[in-house]
Amino acid sequence: MNQRTQQDPMHGMTLKMILEELVSYYGWGELGIYVKIRCFNINPSIKSSLAFLRKISWARAKVEALYKEMLDEKNGKQQSNNSPWPDVD
């Protein structure tokens, strides 16, 4: 693995792969809270979401940013809790 691929978590990732990982990690409900777009909240599907995200650059940018945050969270790099859900002790 070269240095560029180590630094760029998006390297080799398709939008479909990113979306499927996000749905697997967060589920449609939580994903729809993080990125407030209709195709995540009303009858969500990979197909309809991909069609929308390929057309709307701001929405795709939000999804890609959330993907990077998810990777950081999975790798234990993110200390702050930016979840919309309250902490329960």
Image (cartoon, rainbow, N blue to C red):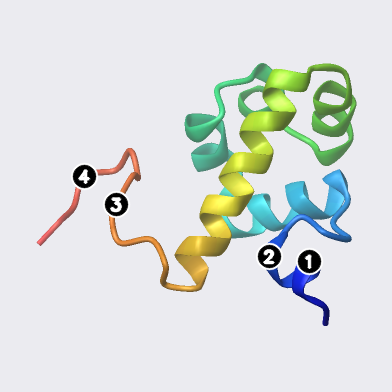
Assess disc 1: are there few (<14), some (14-19) or many (≥20) residues with their C-alpha within 10 Å of its C-alpha: few
Reply above or below: 29 against 9: above
Query: SS at mark 3?
Result: loop
Task: Give the Cα separation between the discs numbered 3 and 2.
Answer: 23 Å
Amino acid marked by disc 1: Arg
- Separation of residues labelled 4 and 3 (CA atoms): 9 Å
- The mark nearer the N terminus, 3 or 1, is 1
- The residue wearing badge 3 is 81
Question: Residue 57: horizontal and vertical position, in percent?
Answer: 77, 21
Q: CA distance from mark 3 to mark 1?
A: 28 Å
Q: Which residue is mark 4?
A: 86
Residue 73's place in the image compared with 50, above or below, is below
Q: Residue furthest left?
A: 89
What secondary structure is marked by label 1?
A: helix
Residue drawn 88% across and 60% down?
A: 12
Q: Is residue 30 left or right of residue 50?
A: left
Q: Residue at point 84% right, 44% down?
A: 15
The single residue placed furthest to the front in the displayed view is 3
Q: The residue under label 4 is which amino acid type?
A: Pro
Residue position for label 2 = 7
Q: Amino acid at mark 3?
A: Asn
Give the mark toward the camera: 3 or 1: 1
